[in-house]
Amino acid sequence: MFSPKHVAPLEHIQLQMEYLKKQLNQAKKENTSVLIAMHIPVGNNVYDGSSFWNKSYQEQFLKIMHDYYKQIKGILAAHTHMDEFKIIRMPENQNMGEYLTAGLSTAHGNFPSIKVFTMNDSGQKWSISNYSTYQIHQIKSQLHIDKYYDFVGAYCKNRPDVIDINTCLSHITFNDILSRYTVNNPNYPLYKAQSPESFYVN
């Protein structure tokens, strides 16, 4: 709905934004945490710098994120067929992760991939404490599922007690994630990111 490739009536867009604000406002009143899931991520594509969302819709969405960032523990998205995350900069020097899962479909010549998220629950205030990425390979006639990496082990060095992976984002650069970006997709042995600055969403 928010993509430049999709033409939706403006009133439908506003209904979606109002619904999101209503849900987040309810979470604020109840002092609970929220995880947002969607297909197309907010921000730009590191492949060519193109925008995933219509600019005005993205501005509205990010304004809502800024207003309620204390309730939001992360955004889960997909669409790019890459194992990536983006850093959304929030007020008070806080960072929010937008975590993308690579493709389960093999339409892009990739190995199927899944993610398993681990949640830390401390009453109503919970957070994402880790995730693990798994690859599915066929060896002869057998399917094998192998762990590729986990976020804390890869990006939260010397911090085994992490309870919120968003707290590890401040020092991470795009080059740090690039080696895991394709999940060893055989069609992308040398992935060329033309717009690595799109790793950040402002």
Image (cartoon, grey):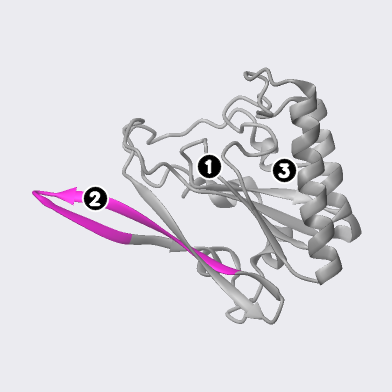
Residue 55 location, quadrant: top right
Instruction: Say what secondary structure mark 3 lies in.
Output: strand
The residue wearing badge 3 is 200
* Left or right of residue 96, residue 70 in this image: right
SS at circle 1: loop
Q: Is residue 130 magenta?
A: yes
Residue 169 lies in the magenta-colored region: no
Q: Is residue 129 left or right of residue 16?
A: left
Mark 3 crowdedness (10 Å alpha carbons): few <14, some 14-19, many ≥20: some
| Residue 186 as seen in the image, left or right of residue 162 | left
**Mark-to-mark CA distance, 3 and 1:** 16 Å
Measured in 3D between alpha carbons, the distance from the residue under mark 2 to the one under mark 1, in whole angstroms, is 20 Å
Residue, disc 1 = 78
Q: Tell me the residue that label 2 is attached to.
A: 137
Q: Secondary structure at mark 2?
A: strand
Q: Quadrant of residue 51?
A: top right
Q: Residue at x 40, y 47 (%)?
A: 183
Question: Percent position (x, y) of residue 168?
Answer: 68, 65
Q: Type of residue at label 2?
A: His
Segment colored magenta: 129-146
- Graded by Cα atoms within 10 Å as few (under 14), some (14 to 19) or many (20 or more), the crowding at tag 1 reads many
Disc 2 to disc 3: CB gap under 8 Å:
no
First along the sequence among labels 3 and 1? 1
Q: Earlier in the sequence, mark 2 or mark 3?
A: 2
Residue lying at 28% horizontally and 52% vertically, measured from the top left: 136
